[in-house]
């Protein structure tokens, strides 16, 4: 027998190409009792590999190929990639070894990273328990020393391993990939192992599953090194031998090393790690008073009940609260809900905008009364059991939307509360998609971009599209694949790389919180920057029992908050965005005329059309819009609109459906309607109904048959005819696969309404906030400026005395923000605003130059401010300002240098600031730049034209030929001919 102990998966990013299930599957195919995973410096795939092996019926051996620094891991003197670390294979013999493996990988990433996640011998000495060591490939320390004829040093290195790990846990690794250096070093390794008294093992350093994957793997290496296959000096492997070989193939390579084969099986027998998927490592919330967790949560909810309904709340609310608290207690959710309540409470107390809710948690009265969510679930017919129930085995999620600019403050609070070592963000892996795989493979094969792009464009867009499905769905792609050799080669290679992990980054929202130091549960590393992230991605971190919460940064919340701040400042009106009246006539009118530009989730042409046609006369219509406008339910939109406009078209398959479907005119729109139908018509509890909904969504055949029988039996007990019951069940089943969660739809409808309310009632302030939110997105800024013009809102260029960093409202106009000007950095903007606060209004260029620090506000910044129009209000034209600038800056620089050196001029003794009061010399006799030149500079610096437009000369002609605004194309009927006048900015 034989076991492969040195194997790299796709998580050795763009180096390994073995999919985890394929690796386990190949071991099972070959009758091997076990197989190891030893990715480069990480344990990213440990959980998925463990599960794949168990499914395939082979023992998983968890390990990694560590990078060991030649001296200290902290030594980062530049000695090049090759000399920065040696390779060493570490295998976990037991759970203690797996924990040490996790610690070592974490240390390598967080402390020793230098080209690679390095550890050192000091780490090995401290965290050696439970580990078995293999000396690795040619890049291992011992083979490297032997190849340099440093036999004594190689023996010393091996003896260090023996002293550290024990003689029975150290093995010399033998390889044969047809490489000359391997042939040279293998006899030396055998001799050294015998001298020191340690065993040998044979291994194949697997990087891909099958021999014919060698070219595909070579392509991945080219992606990693940004090279092409034809590059002579690129990184490449020596031949196609790094695949999952059979035992017979391995024995043919090592005919005289029978004991080394036996040792692989003996090591596999010794390596037994059991990952714990049953323990929850959730932190426990600690109340600020001596009271039990459930009592504390009840106290919060009862206070919320009194706050919303007075001292005599409706009986239905009291009963629902008692019921939910009982379920939450039995499910062990009390601490979890209090943890979420606590950081949301912190955010609200510190003025950090929080969304009204997200997902199924919006259906919980407990979440509403405690302040986690903002929507009354009873009023809007939301269902608690969609969030959690005694029947549901899985743990619920409470995801939270936060102001994108201040999300980090909430995460920092959670870190302080539970401990820096117990809170981390979550890693995520970018994968090679269908189109990307074609483009990448085509590039590394050296084909012309146009030829490859032609193939890629035949692959449909959208989520879930694979090359396999594209070949089935697209006849042109299939034909090209069958008739063109280049296309066939590209697609065949792309199919093997499609879906492989390409790079690692930080998940946009996910945070984990642990009851103990995270490294005890999951290995850690750095994300895209200095942030600490888990080495496991989203699903594995939950499977090992960590509490995961999504802290989603939502830009719209920032816009709403900023708009409210502007309104308070300019109009003295303090708004509570959580208490807008939901029947505001201006808001409903704005929505009905499809004035949706800049509104949350309504900006697409499809949503705009839906708003125009649906006839919005209540908040619930917005809830329905969000649920309807997605694949699947969209098919029912015409029927929904027709029934809304003509109630005589509304029909129900059974009278009991009327109270359930009346709000959506007899059409299933929400998942909760499926649950209530099963509850009312067939006697399901709402918890059982959620299990039914989930089964329908997953389309599990056996489970669905059992559910069908239960539904028909329950319907019969309610005296519902079998044919009617079968028809209703069929409608539910067809809908449930794509139905939407009403709790989420209602929460997001609230954000839609808030943006619409602000735009309808405070258009200038809202548009200023919206423009500020997109200050670095030229396309969006241009679109929103056009929207301002449509609403008669003037946008003025930036002004040195009036502009702030963001767009602001000044009287009846919106003033451009300084931060929107190119080449004017954040530091310069902050400096200008701070100096203006103490100095007052600037009246001249040299006064401004004398006041600011020219090291912060440099010549390039001055030039950009001039040509963007920021100094227009000072009285000189831009050409005069540009001509005077060099002498003004030279004079200001000399004066600042004199002040810093302690020299004081005669004039300085009689001024407060040491700066000149305005321009003291006549302006240069320079005519203003031609209009086209001024506008071209504005376009360059601001992204669009502010003080005019190049088409202004053609205004009469444009009016005469009745051109439509360019943005009208977004909502125009596709059958309508439209004339537009515009400048082609690029092709």
Image (cartoon, rainbow, N blue to C red):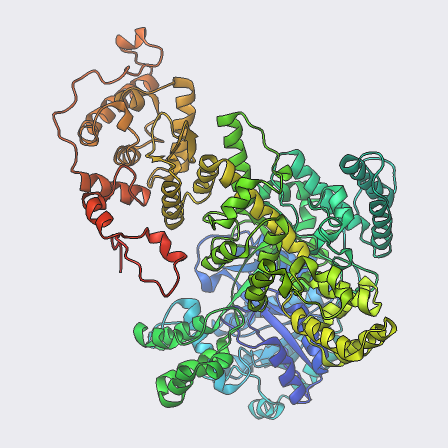
Quadrant placement of the N terminus:
bottom right
Q: Nearer the viewer, residue 819 or 109?
A: 819
Quarter of the rendering containing residue 164: bottom right
Residue 720 left/right relative to 603:
right
Q: Is residue 886 above or below residue 777?
A: above
Left or right: residue 953 compared with residue 740: left
**Viewed as shown, does residue 732 lie left or right of 886?**
right
Q: Is residue 815 above or below residue 240?
A: above
User: Can you say which quadrant of the picture contains the C terminus?
Assistant: bottom left
Q: Which residue is most to the front?
A: 648
Quadrant of residue 349 within the rendered picture: top right
Tell me which residue sits at (47%, 73%) in the image: 434
Taking the image as drawn, is residue 898 in sight?
yes
Count the labels in the image: 0
Residue ID at (55%, 90%): 253
Give the percent coordinates (x, y) of residue 637.
56, 64
Nearer-the-camera pick, 959 or 646 = 646
Quick one: 874 or 945, which is closer to the camera? 945
Tell me where residue 114 appears, x and y as whole percent: 50, 56
Q: Position of residue 121 (x, y in %)?
A: 62, 59
Res. 644 image quadrant = bottom right
Compared across the picture, whether 670 is left or right of 432 comes to right
């Amino acid at each position: 027998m034989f076991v492969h102990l040195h194997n790299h998966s796709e998580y050795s990013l763009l180096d390994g190409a073995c999919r985890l299930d394929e690796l386990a599957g190949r071991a099972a195919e070959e009758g091997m009792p076990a197989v190891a995973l030893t990715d480069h410096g990480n344990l990213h795939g440990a959980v998925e590999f463990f599960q794949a092996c168990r499914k395939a019926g082979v023992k998983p051996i968890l390990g990694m190929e560590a990078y060991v620094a030649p001296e200290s891991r902290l030594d980062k003197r530049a000695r090049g990639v090759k000399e920065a670390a040696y390779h060493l294979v570490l295998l976990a013999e037991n759970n203690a070894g797996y924990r040490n493996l996790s610690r070592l990988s974490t240390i390598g990433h967080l402390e020793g990273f230098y080209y690679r996640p390095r550890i050192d011998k000091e780490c090995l000495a401290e965290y050696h328990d439970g580990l078995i060591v293999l000396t690795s490939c040619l890049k291992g320390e011992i083979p490297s020393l032997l190849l340099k004829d440093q036999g004594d040093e190689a023996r010393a290195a091996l003896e260090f391993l023996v002293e550290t790990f024990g003689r029975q846990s150290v093995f010399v690794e033998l390889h044969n990939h047809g490489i000359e250096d391997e042939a040279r070093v293998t006899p030396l390794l055998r001799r050294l192992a015998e001298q020191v008294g340690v065993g040998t093992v044979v291994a194949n350093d697997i990087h891909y599953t099958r021999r014919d994957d060698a070219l595909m793997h070579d392509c991945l290496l080219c992606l990693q090194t940004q090279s092409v296959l034809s590059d002579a000096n690129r990184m490449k492997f020596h031949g196609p031998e790094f695949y999952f070989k059979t035992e017979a193939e391995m024995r043919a390579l090592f005919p005289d090393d029978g004991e080394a084969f036996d040792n692989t099986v003996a090591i596999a027998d010794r390596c037994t790690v059991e990952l714990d998927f049953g323990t929850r490592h959730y932190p426990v919330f600690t109340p600020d008073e001596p009271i039990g967790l459930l009592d504390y949560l009840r106290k919060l909810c009862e206070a919320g009940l009194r706050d919303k309904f007075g001292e005599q709340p409706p009986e239905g609310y009291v009963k629902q609260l008692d019921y939910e608290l009982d379920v939450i207690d039995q499910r062990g959710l009390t601490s979890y809900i209090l943890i979420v309540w606590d950081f949301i409470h912190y955010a609200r107390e510190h003025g950090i905008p929080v969304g009204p809710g997200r997902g199924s948690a919006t259906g919980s009265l407990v979440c509403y009364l405690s302040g986690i969510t903002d929507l009354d679930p009873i009023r809007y017919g939301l269902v608690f059991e969609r969030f959690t129930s005694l029947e549901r085995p899985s743990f619920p999620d409470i995801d939270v939307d936060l102001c994108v600019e201040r999300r980090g403050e909430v995460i920092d609070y959670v870190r302080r509360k539970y401990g820096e070592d117990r809170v981390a963000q979550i890693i995520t892996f970018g994968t090679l998609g269908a189109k990307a795989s074609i483009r990448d493979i085509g590039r590394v094969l050296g084909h012309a971009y146009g030829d490859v792009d032609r193939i890629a464009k035949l692959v449909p867009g959208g989520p879930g599209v694979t090359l396999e499905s594209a070949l089935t769905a697209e006849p042109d792609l299939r034909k090209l694949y069958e008739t063109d050799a280049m296309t066939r080669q590209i697609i065949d290679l792309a199919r093997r790389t499609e879906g492989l992990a390409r790079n690692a980054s930080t998940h946009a929202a996910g945070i984990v919180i642990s009851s103990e130091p995270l490294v005890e549960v999951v290995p850690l590393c750095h994300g895209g920057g200095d942030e600490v992230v888990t080495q496991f991605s989203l699903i594995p971190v939950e499977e090992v029992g960590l509490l995961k919460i999504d802290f989603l940064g939502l830009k719209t919340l920032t816009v709403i908050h900023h708009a409210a701040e502007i309104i308070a400042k300019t109009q003295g009106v303090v708004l509570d965005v959580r208490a807008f009246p939901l029947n505001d006539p201006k808001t409903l009118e704005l929505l009905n005329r499809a004035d949706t530009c800049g509104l949350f989730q309504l900006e697409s042409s499809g949503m705009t059309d839906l708003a125009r046609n649906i006839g919005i006369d209540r908040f619930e219509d917005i809830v329905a819009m969000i649920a309807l406008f997605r694949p699947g339910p969209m098919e029912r939109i015409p029927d929904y609109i027709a029934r809304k406009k003509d109630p005589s078209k509304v029909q129900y398959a059974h009278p009991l459906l009327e109270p359930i479907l009346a709000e959506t005119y007899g059409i299933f729109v929400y998942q909760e309607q499926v649950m209530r139908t099963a509850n009312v018509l067939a006697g399901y509890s709402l918890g059982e109904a959620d299990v039914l909904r989930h089964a329908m969504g997953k389309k599990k055949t056996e489970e669905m048959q059992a559910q069908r029988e239960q539904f028909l039996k329950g319907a019969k007990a309610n005296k519902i005819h079998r044919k009617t019951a079968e028809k209703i069940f069929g409608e539910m089943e067809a809908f449930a696969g794509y139905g939407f969660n009403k709790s989420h739809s209602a929460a997001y409808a609230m954000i839609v309404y808030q943006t619409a309310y602000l735009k309808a009632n405070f258009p200038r302030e809202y548009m200023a906030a919206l423009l500020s939110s997109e200050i670095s997105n030229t396309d969006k800024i241009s679109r929103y400026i056009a929207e301002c013009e449509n609403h008669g809102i003037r946008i003025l260029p930036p002004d040195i005395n009036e502009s702030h960093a963001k767009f602001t409202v000044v009287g009846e106009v919106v003033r451009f923000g300084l931060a929107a000007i190119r080449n004017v950095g954040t530091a310069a903007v902050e400096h200008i605003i701070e100096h203006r606060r103490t100095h007052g209004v600037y009246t001249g260029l040299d006064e401004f130059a004398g006041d600011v620090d020219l090291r912060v506000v440099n010549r390039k910044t001055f030039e950009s401010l001039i040509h963007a129009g920021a100094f227009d209000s000072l009285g000189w034209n831009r050409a005069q300002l540009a001509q005077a600038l060099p002498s003004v800056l030279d004079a200001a620089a000399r004066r600042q240098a004199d002040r810093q050196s302690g020299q004081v001029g005669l004039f300085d003794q009689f001024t407060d600031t040491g700066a000149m009061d305005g321009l003291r010399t006549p302006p240069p006799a320079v005519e203003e730049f031609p209009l086209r030149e001024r506008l071209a500079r504005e376009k360059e610096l601001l992204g669009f034209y502010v003080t005019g437009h190049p088409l202004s000369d053609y205004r009469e002609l444009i009016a005469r030929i009745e051109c439509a605004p360019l943005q009208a194309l977004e909502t125009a009927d596709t059958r309508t001919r439209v004339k537009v006048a515009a400048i082609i900015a690029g092709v």
